[in-house]
Image (spheres, helix red, strand yellow):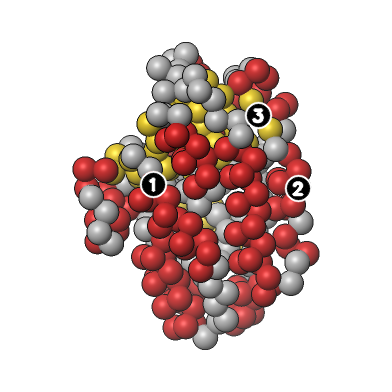
Amino acid sequence: MKIDIAVNGRFHMFDLAKELNNKKCLNKIITTYPKWKVQEWGIVKDEINSIVFIEVLKRLKKYYPKKITPFFMLKQKELFDRISSRYISNSADIFVGLSTNCLYSLKKAKSNNITTIVECGSTHVLHQKKVFSREYKKCGVEYVPTHKGLISRAIEEYSAADYISVPSKHVMRTFVDYGVDKNKIICNPYGVDLSGFYNIDKSDDKFRVVACGAVSLFRGAHYLIEAFYKLNMKNSELCFIGEIREEMLVFINKYKHKNIYDLGHKPQNDLYKYYSQGSLLCITSMDEGLALLIPQAM
C-alpha cells in the first residue's frame, strides 16, 4: 500500500508521514516546508514535494491589514491545493489531505481511482463558527469571521472525500450533528513520540500552571488569566507558551499580576523542559479536536 499526503504547513501530519514511512507505506508528502526540514522526520528527499514560497507568504500575513486576513487565508490555501494536486501520483493507493487545503487534490486523486481521506483535526467548520462567534460577542471583541469561501471549501471536501479522519469522539459528534454519515468517519486519536517527550526533575517547589498554545480568546486564555488573578495563590505562577494575540491585551491589562508570564513561542523539541517544570497543564480552549499538547504533557 502506498499513501500520498498533502499538508499546508506541518501540524500532526509530519508525524503521520513519519510512521507511514517507517511502515514502508509513504509514497510522498507534499508540503510548504523545505525539504531539509522534512528530512528531520526521517523522510528522504525523493519522497518530498516542497512548495516553500507559500510558507513564506503565510508567515508574512501578520503584516497584512486585519480585514483582508480571511481572504488571504482562503487564497493561499487554494494556491497550495492547485499546485499540490499536480503532484498526486498514479502509483498511490490512498491520498490524505489536510482539511480546507485539499479540494482540488481530492478530485484529482478520485479521478485516478485513489481512495481519499480528508484529515480534520478540528470540529465541523460550522460548529467552530458558532462557538467562536458566540465567544467573541460575549467578550465584546471584534470577531473577524472565517471567509465564507473557506467554509464552503471545507464542506465540499467533507462531501468529496471517501472518508473523514478525526482525532476524537467529540469531533465525530459535531460531524454527525451536521448530517455527515457516521460510517464515513474514522476516529483516530493522535499519538506522541516518547523519545521527544519525557519527564525531568522539577527544579523548585513553586505551584506552576502551564498553558501552551496561542494566547487568544478561542484558546480561552482570558478565563485562565482571570481565574489565576482572583485565586491569588502564594508561591505560584502562570506561564504561557505561545504568541499573545492583540485581542488579549485588554484582559492582560485588566488582570495584571506579577506572577503571570509569557515565555513566547518555544521549539517543540524543548517543550518537555517546560512541561516538566509545571505542576499542572491547563487547557481552556473554547473548542478542540484533540490538542497534541495533552498527550505530549502526559
Amino acid type, residue under disc 1 in the picture: Ala
Please give the label number shown on residue 36. Answer: none
Ranked by sequence position, the earlier of labels 3 and 2 is: 3
Picture residue at 47% right of the left edge, 63% below the top? 151
Closer to the eye: label 3 or 1: 1
In the displayed orientation, state which residue is furthest to the front.
111
Please give the label number shown on residue 56. Answer: 2
Percent across and percent down for residue 55 are: 71, 45
Query: Seen in the image, is 180 located left or right of residue 147?
Result: left
Q: Local crowd at mark 2 within 10 Å, few (<14), some, or many (≥20)?
A: few
Query: Seen in the image, is 220 located left or right of residue 184?
Result: right
In the rendered image, is residue 191 in sight? no
Under tag 1, what secondary structure? Answer: helix
Marks 3 & 1, CB-CB < 8 Å contact: no
* Vertical order, 205 against 283 (above or below): above
Percent across and percent down for residue 244 are: 64, 64
Under tag 2, what secondary structure? Answer: helix
Percent across and percent down for residue 68 are: 68, 70
* Vertical order, 118 against 138 (above or below): above
Marks 1 & 2, CB-CB < 8 Å contact: no
Please give the label number shown on residue 160. Answer: 1
Percent across and percent down for residue 157 are: 42, 50
Residue closer to the observer: 70 or 276? 70
* Vertical order, 66 against 291 (above or below): below
Marks 3 & 2, CB-CB < 8 Å contact: no
Amino acid type, residue under disc 3 in the picture: Asn
Picture residue at 26% right of the left edge, 43% below the top? 184
The image quadrant that residue 164 belongs to is top left
Disc 3 marks which residue?
A: 49
